[in-house]
Amino acid sequence: MTQADRDRLVALRKAKKKMITQRQAAEELEITTRQVRRLLLKLKAEGDKAVVHGLRGRPSNRRLSEAMRQRAIEILKEPLYEGFGPTLASEHLERRYKIQIGREALRQLMSAAGLWRVKRRKVEEIHTWRPRRSRFGELVQWDTSDHDWLEGRGERLYLIHMIDDATSRLRARFVRHDTSEENLRMLRGWLESHGRMLACYTDKASMFQTTPKNYRKQTDLPRQEREPLPPTQIGRALNELGIVWIAAHSPQAKGRVERSFQTAQDRLVKELRVAGARTLEQANRVLEEIFLPWWEAHCTVKPEHPDDAHRRLDAGHNLDASLSIVESRQVNGGDYSFRLDNQLYAIERADIMTGMRGAQLRVERRLDGTMAVAFRGKYLRYRKCEAAAPATAVTPKPTVKAGKKNKPQQRSSWMKDFDLHKSPPVWKAARAR
């Protein structure tokens, strides 16, 4: 008999001896007066064991059969499910094999079979987490994880995460390379789905922040007096869209996105293994059809304030222009052309305007592979110039006159028998003439 049973027995004995009313006993036991009357009758017939539930010590009516329990253990012993925890294993047994078993019951089965070991948590220093933002869209944490997602079955992949700080709503995508273009595509997907967030929280990677270069002349200058560094492509895009960029000084500062990667490196890796994903397309399919719906159902929370902090995209925002790789090129004053990647482009004659000679053009390499050229906010038409064929030097062939053969050159004999010392002086020769 447990302590709760003893407390119930004391209240029932008081009601039996008329020390308290049946209504007072019902309030104390948090049951109805009808149940109190039934327990009093049972107490009179059976004694103190009336407060003990009749099914105590008996197997549950919902208990799985021994064959079904053994079948579940045999499935989880397969190499495909190595490392699965009770929660994830329970979901897969129900989804793939139609075996419904609770995670706590499965935990006991797996522990008895040696498939799960309870880990004792170490006493750690208490760390107070930063409170969440109050509205959806106030702060979005953004990072990329380099992990062996396919466990050696395919190519190396990177996982980009964008997670809202207030609600933990997640947007993710597998990519082959962690580049500015792929991160701009991820940003575009968030903007098209929700709008412009107030701020983005990232690390100090080179794609978000330009690496400072300390020259000898600037090492002694204070930080405020040094020349400002140009923004990166992502920094420029965020500035054009009116989104604040915040840099984290440590991985712990952006703990929400780091913890989302820990969950993905445990659960998502196993989902990819079960699905047999080997390519980028298969990995993204598992991510979108299985992992992200599960995350939305189990890991998101309601914000403190229900209103949305996202701002809509106005007519003045051009996502194609802002979310592109932008470079500057100088116009050649002679023929109004510019060079890019060792290729010469000429501006159409109808778009040439005053002040363009020697000026800087804005060249946009857009995410869809096209290119746009703008000057003073106006887009220009241009054409690719065909490269001229290089002139080859032609060596002239020696001309040979007809009827004459090349003879070896002979030394001239016009000064033969001439002696400078024996000849008469010049004045005598002149007088004689």
Image: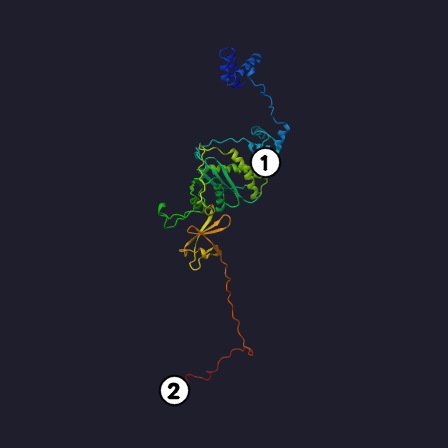
Q: Position of residue 341 (x, y in %)?
A: 48, 54
Query: Foreground residue, 345 or 8?
Result: 345
Element on which disc 1 rests: helix
Instruction: Using the image, determine if residue 160 lies above or below residue 333.
Output: above
Structural distance between the alpha carbons of marks 2 and 1: 124 Å
Query: Foreground residue, 354 or 4?
Result: 354
Q: Position of residue 321 (x, y in %)?
A: 46, 48
Which residue of the protein is positioned furthest toward the top in this rendering? 17
Q: Position of residue 160 (x, y in %)?
A: 50, 42
Q: Position of residue 12 (x, y in %)?
A: 52, 14
> In the rendered structure, which amino acid carries the disc numbered 2?
Ala
Asked whether residue 342 is in view, the answer is no
Element on which disc 2 rests: helix
Disc 2 packing (10 Å; few <14; some 14–19; many ≥20): few
Instruction: Using the image, determine if residue 344 lies above or below residue 427.
Output: above
* Numbered label attached to residue 342: none
Q: Disc 2 or 1, which lies upstream in sequence?
A: 1
Query: Foreground residue, 165 or 249?
Result: 165
Q: Which residue is mark 2?
A: 430
> In the rendered structure, which amino acid carries the disc numbered 1?
Tyr
Quadrant the N terminus occupies? top right
Instruction: Using the image, determine if residue 9 lies above or below residue 126.
Output: above
Q: Residue at x 49, y 17 (%)?
A: 27
Q: Which residue is mark 1?
A: 81
Which residue of the protein is positioned furthest toward the right in this rendering? 67
Quadrant the C terminus occupies? bottom left
Q: How many marks?
A: 2
